[in-house]
Every structure is written in C-alpha cells, then in structure tokens.
Image (cartoon, rainbow, N blue to C red):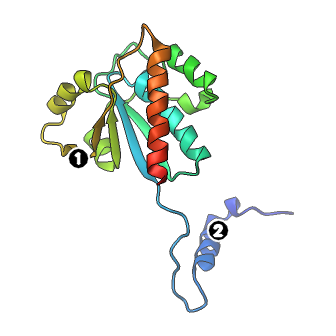
Amino acid sequence: MSYSFLQYPLAATVLLFVLCVNCTGEIRRSESKPTKQILFVCTGNYYRSRFAEALFNQEARVANLHWKAMSRGLALVSSQHGISSLALRELKQRGVSADQCNGTPKPLTEEDLDQSDYIVLMDEAEHRAMFEKQFPGFDESKIHYWHILDGRDNSTHACQLMSNNVSQLIRNFHQ
C-alpha cells in the first residue's frame, strides 16, 4: 500500500519545515523569490486587459520570472462573459492556451490596486478620468499608462502593440 503526503497534510508540513531548518536549528530563507503582481486594467475586462494578462503570464513562466498578472475592468458590461473571441484568436495565434483565459470579467477594486506592484491602464485617454473618479486620491506612483485603443476594428494591430509592450515589461522585470 502506498501513501501520499496529500493524504497527510500535517506530515507534509512537518517535512517541509524540517527541510528548511539547517543543522544549527536556524530557519533558512526560501531560495525562491517572492512573486510580484502586475495588474492590467481596461474598460470591460473583456478584451485588452485579459489578453495582456494571459500573454504576460505565459511569457513570465517561460522566462522564469517571479511575476504574475491579473486583470480587471473599470466599467463592466453585464452582457459580456468570458473573453472576447478576437482576443482569444490572437492569443491562440501566439501559442497561449485557452485555459489561461478562463473566468468572467471582474471589476477593479481598491484591494486589487493595493495588492499590485505594477499597474497598467490600457488607454490613458480613455481610462485616466474613469480611474480618478472611481479611486480619488489613489497614489498613482504604481500606475503606468499605455495607449492601446479598444481595437475592435483592428484587433490585430491592438494585440501586436500589447504583445510588444508585454515583451518589453518581461525584459525590464527580468533585469
């Protein structure tokens, strides 16, 4: 009969603790770096921010970067569910699997902002006023603005711009 540590969570916890204690009894710091969070924000959390989130997470994983992305929207549309078929098509063309795009659009909260290390609003002209109205007085030092228009008429162009920006972020964060 074989046993798994998953069947005995306390034993697994004790083993992990023991492995982290050196011979002098001091607890060693973990070798892995803490994960930082980037937050992508667009209007409906249906197209641009979801595209950037999925692409960033895949590229960060490939680059062994200790960052994770999430996405939110400033003004969700109740009729929109999942992710835009345009964004999904563009992600698939870039080798990002559809399972990275699960979930429904989510509204931006103050907690999301506080927990994020780096925040990108997709289109400054469209989103700055919306953001300032919803979160007056928020310290904008973590906020960065891109200039990515909604792109419904030319999703390929918008996705290429986002793809370029995500790749640049990966390079910058890797340094």
Q: Decide: few, some or many residues near mark 2? Use Cα within 10 Å; few <14, some 14-19, many ≥20.
A: some
**Image quarter hosting the N terminus:** bottom right
Q: Secondary structure at mark 1?
A: helix
Residue that label 1 marks: 141
* Residue most extreme to the left: 137
Quadrant in the rendering for residue 107: top left
Quadrant in the rendering for residue 92: top right
* Residue most extreme to the top: 153
Kind of residue sitting beneath label 1: Ser
* Residue most extreme to the bottom: 24
In this orientation, which residue lies closer to the viewer: 112 or 166? 166
Of labels 2 and 1, the one closer to you: 1
Residue that label 2 marks: 12
Give me the residue at 27% from left, 46% from top.
Answer: 142
Give me the residue at 61% from left, 72% from top.
Answer: 16
**Disc 2 vs disc 1: Cβ atoms closer than 8 Å?**
no
Give me the residue at 23% from left, 46% from top.
Answer: 141
Residue 116 in sight in this render: no
Quadrant in the rendering for residue 44: top left
Q: Secondary structure at mark 2?
A: helix
In this orientation, which residue lies closer to the viewer: 3 or 72? 72
Kind of residue sitting beneath label 2: Ala
Residue 133's spot in the image, x, y percent?
A: 15, 29
Residue 13's spot in the image, x, y percent?
A: 59, 69
128 vs 153: above or below: below
Residue 57 in sight in this render: yes
Residue 100's spot in the image, x, y percent?
A: 57, 33
